[in-house]
Image (cartoon, rainbow, N blue to C red):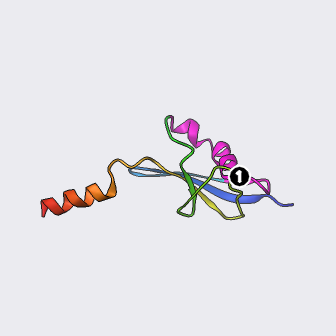
Amino acid sequence: MAAIRVEVVYALPHGADSVELRLPPGATAADAVRASGLVERHPGMNAQAIGVFGRRVRPETRLADGDRVEIYRPLVLDPKEARRRRARKR
């Protein structure tokens, strides 16, 4: 079987770091994160908070050809609290 092509992306405050990979069929989201090298480039990231195309997934989720694996950063501020603060400023 042919390898699958996936992209692994880590969003940063001012841009993103992404890596394109070819993995064996049956590879998981965790396999992609490990193979990307992003954890080593960005120490302290939580590589367990991941998703595929904006949908949160478990690390053992199997990937398909063309998937985009996203590594999520923790929120700095709760979205509801951010809206409250913006409303108070108005």
Q: Which residues are magenta?
A: 21-43
Question: Is 36 a magenta residue?
Answer: yes
Which residue: 12% across, 64% down?
90
Which residue: 25% across, 61% down?
83
* Number of dots carrying numbers: 1
Tell me the quarter of the image containing the N terminus.
bottom right
Which structural element holds mark 1?
A: loop
| Residue nearest the viewer, comparing 15 with 74 | 74
Q: Position of residue 23 (x, y in %)?
A: 75, 53
Q: Position of residue 66 (x, y in %)?
A: 67, 65
Q: Position of residue 76 (x, y in %)?
A: 35, 47
**Compared with residue 70, is residue 47 higher up or lower down, i.e. above or below?**
above
For residue 39, what is the image quadrant? Answer: top right
Judge from the rendering whether residue 11 lies leftward or rightward of residue 18; answer left or right.
Answer: left
Question: Is 55 a magenta residue?
Answer: no
Which residue: 71% across, 52% down?
28
Q: Assess disc 1: are there few (<14), some (14-19) or many (≥20) residues with their C-alpha within 10 Å of its C-alpha.
A: some
Judge from the rendering whether residue 45 lies leftward or rightward of residue 84; answer left or right.
Answer: right
The type of residue carrying mark 1 is Thr
Q: Which residue is mark 1?
A: 28
Q: Which residue is most to the right?
A: 1
For residue 7, what is the image quadrant? Answer: bottom right
Which residue: 64% across, 49% down?
59
Judge from the rendering whether residue 74 lies leftward or rightward of residue 66; answer left or right.
Answer: left
| Residue nearest the viewer, comparing 19 with 85 | 85
Judge from the rendering whether residue 77 lies leftward or rightward of residue 64; answer left or right.
Answer: left
Q: Position of residue 47 (x, y in %)?
A: 56, 43
